[in-house]
Image (cartoon, rainbow, N blue to C red):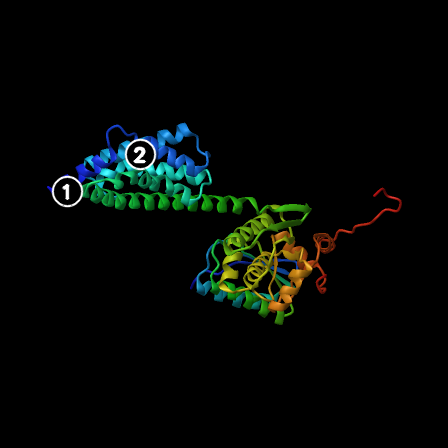
Amino acid sequence: MAKRDSAADLVGLLTIEGQDLAAAWVREVSGSLGGRVGTAELDRELRELYDALVDALRQGATDVHSEQMSEIRALLTELSRNRARQGFSPTETAISVFALKRVLEPVLQDGTADQIRAYLQFNGILDGLGLFAIETYTQTRDELIAAQAEQLLELSTPVVRLWDGVIAVPLVGTLDSARTQVVMEKLLQALVDTGSEQAIIDITGVPAVDTQVAQHLLKTIVAARLMGAECTVSGISPQIAQTIVALGIEFDDIVTKASLADALKLALRRSGVDLVAHEGAQR
Amino acid sequence: MSERLPILRIGDILLVSVQFDLEDQMVLNLQEDLANEIVAKSARGVVIDISALEIVDSFVGRMLATVAAISRVLDARTVVVGMRPAVAITLVELGLSLGGVSTALDLEKGLAKLRQPTSSALR
């Protein structure tokens, strides 16, 4: 029956008569969060957690993953998720759990041997809960990042029609395999949809070009050529031109232009359009 | 005896429209028939329409390159028209860039390309 006894000790530790430990806990946590969570909300969250914790201990829960702790896990998950979404740091999330240790510290001053043993055991449980909170926090953050990456993927690859038979893709941001794949598919589909024979890939907004990015670009251009369209790469900054030469990347017979305007001029010439400036025209 | 693809003649241009996935033997037959037809009809150009193909494997890819090479020897130009985006991506991933094969978006543009006098590409 040693287990029962320790459970009783744990519950005893958390429910000292005449003391509102939950209130002390809330004070401790709200101090560390610097008032960024409303006191009323914090009070509700932590009291729920506290009550659930006492309940679970009463039922003989011994660690985070035991069955009796399922309610605590649910509450902690919600708390960690909220913290992650509101932009709190992992420390600030975990402190919500660990602060309870500090609240219980006074017990140690003049506690009996049983109480101290119970405190140490409870410490272990709290550590488990804290780690669980951080784990959930990280998971939520990862989900957020994944969702944002997906949004970015959709946002940043428009195909625009510049002229009859001339389309352009202004690329912005770093290119990786996933993005290039999307760009490639969109560009090729746009060629079919608009019946364009000239495509311009503008990399003005691409901060750096390495061998991998160049490889991706080349693939896209070869694929467009297979379908019967000509690709021009434009928007190559002096910096990137130097990098390309330093890396020894060969663009072979692919036409590259410094600016989108030059590329458009070429595309128009290739599709048989003549641009004539009228004298005295308003600029 | 396996099926053979029909080869149509428009003026001095030969047109092959591939409507379904090809078996290897048909590919070989097509290569042979085209060579014969180019000589018999003294054709100046060959248009191969693959707009109905959803899958092009390396064998068909190589056939296209071979047909282009054969017709070049016989003084005819080959244009492959109507390649789908997915097919183009697959060929690039396979490392087949079909060097020496002209391409066009659709049949109309392909025929227009053959009518143009050969000139070095604009840069």
Q: Position of residue A131 (x, y in %)?
A: 33, 46
**10 Å neighbourhood of mark 2: few (<14), some, or many (≥20)?**
many
- Side (left or right) of A174 relative to B117: left
Pick the residue in front: A275 or A60.
A60
| Residue type at numbered disc 1 | Lys
Label 2 and label 1: CA atoms lie apart by 23 Å
The secondary element bearing badge 1 is classed as: helix
What is the secondary structure assignment of the residue under circle 2?
helix
Q: Is residue B30 above or below residue A57?
A: below
Q: Residue at x 22, y 40 (%)?
A: A111
Could you tell me the amino acid type at mark 2? Leu
Residue under pointer 2:
A49
Q: Where is the C terminus of chain A found, in terms of image quarters?
A: top right
Q: Tag 2, which chain? A: A
At x 82%, y 49%, the residue is: A276
Residue A83 sits in quarter? top left
Crowding at mark 1 (Cα within 10 Å: few <14, some 14-19, many 20+): few
Rendered image quadrant of residue B36:
bottom right
- Quadrant containing the N terminus of chain A is top left
Q: Considering only order in the chain, which callout, 1 or 2, is on the residue closer to the N terminus?
A: 1
Q: Is residue B18 visible?
A: no
Q: Do residues under tags 2 and 1 come within 8 Å of each other at their CB atoms?
A: no
Q: Position of residue A76 (x, y in %)?
A: 33, 38
Q: Position of residue A208 (x, y in %)?
A: 60, 58
**Are labels 2 and 1 on one chain?**
yes
Q: Nearer the viewer, residue A183 or B70?
A: A183
- Residue projecting furthest to the bottom: B73
| Front one among B19 and A33 | A33
Residue where numbered disc 1 is placed: A3
Residue at 41% x, 45% y: name it: A90
Which one is in front, A80 or B92? A80
